Each structure stands twice: as C-alpha cells, then as structure tokens.
Image (cartoon, rainbow, N blue to C red):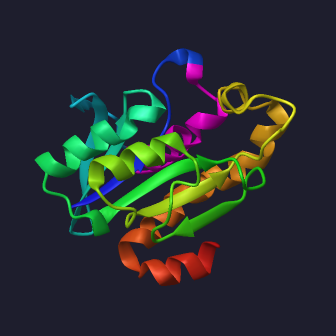
Amino acid sequence: MKLIVGLGNPGREYERTRHNIGFMAIDRIVDSLGLKFDKNKFNGSYCVSNINGEKVMFLKPLEYMNLSGNVVGRFVKFFDIDVSDILIIHDDLDMDLGRIKLRPRGSSGGHNGLKNIEANLGTQDYKRVKVGISNDKRFDTKDYVLGRFSSSDMEILNPILDKMPDIFNDFLSISFEMLMNKYN
C-alpha cells in the first residue's frame, strides 16, 4: 500500500496559507481521481482507492503541522505501511515560490512537521515533494508560513498544483529516480 500525505494545519482559518500547500496539493490529486476524504481515523482524514492494481491511501493529518508525524506514525503502524511506500508533500521556505523538488530522503531542513514525522518513523528515508513557498525575511517565520497566499501567488502556484496528479501517477508507475529527473 502507498501512503500519500499532504501536510497542513486543520481548520478554515488556515486555508490558503503557505503552510497548507501540502493540503492544497493532495486535494488536487484526490479531486482529479474523483475521490473524497470520507474517512477519519487517528486524527487524520483519508480516503483509499485501488489504482492500477495498487492500493493507495491519501491522508491529511488533522493535528497541527508540528504534530503531523503523530498521525502519520499511527497510520504507518496500523496499516503496516513500508517507509519506502510513503510520499510526503510539504512546503519549503528555502525554495522560490512555485518551484518543486522531489527528494528520496533527507533532513527536515528545520521544518517542524518533518521533524515530527522523522521522530515518529525513526528515519529520514521517506520520499517527499517539496513545494517552494519562498521566504520573506521581513516577517517572523511563524507569521509568514501562516500567512495567506495572494492572488498573484496563486497565479504562480496553480500550474504547479495542476501538475500534482501527474506527479502522483508517475510515482505509481516509474522509479523515483526517473520521477526526480522528470520534475526536478
């Protein structure tokens, strides 16, 4: 079973914020498949589908970003998911707005959601899609990541979000190395 996780913060007040780009990306994938987040377990909203003979679970942790790993860890343990079958989609402050980068493993880079995932999984060896949200040093980091995207930001991000279903489909059908070569 594959586990695709979009990171974000739960609640309407966090919709369209920079930290919620993972939620926005996974929503595009799920919508493109005609699915809905219709189940809840372990404080996570999820749905499951069989795609090309592969069982795939899509998950949005409903704990705050810094505790996302608690939810991911419970799903991995309960459903006996191999770490090599996990893909995390998250924001990255150190990349230009709208840039994407796929990585097979790596450090958290200071991202508290990823730190919590690593603590719960006991490894940094999980695949990830990083979506650049840029960084405006005029603001405190916490205020910046919880700030909403502007209309001009969304003009940059929408084409990237529209690519997420393609990235997901390729994740199921080609090696991760080929996937990185195609999208990085």
Of residues 17 and 28, the one drawn nearer to the viewer in this rendering: 17
- Residue 27 at what x, y percent from top left? 48, 41
Quadrant of the image occupied by residue 99: bottom right
Does 83 sit above or below residue 91? below
Q: Nearer the viewer, residue 72 or 38?
A: 72
Q: Is 85 above or below relative to 182?
A: above
Observer able to see residue 124: yes
Q: Give the range drawn in magenta.
A: 14-34
Can residue 6 be seen? no
Q: Which residue is drawn at the image coordinates 34% and 48% (left, top)?
A: 119
Rendering quarter of residue 127: bottom left
Q: In this view, does 12 lie above or below 144?
A: above
- Quadrant where the C terminus sits is bottom right
The image position of residue 136, as x and y in percent, is 83, 38
Image location of residue 98, percent across then percent down: 73, 53
**Which residue is at 21% across, 64% downward?**
82
Residue 26 magenta: yes
Q: State which quadrant residue 171 falls in.
A: bottom left
Q: Is residue 50 magenta?
A: no
- At 54% from the left and 46% from the top, the residue drawn is 25
At 60% across and 79% down in the image, what residue appears? 182
Percent of width and height locating residue 113:
47, 41
Quadrant including the N terminus: bottom left
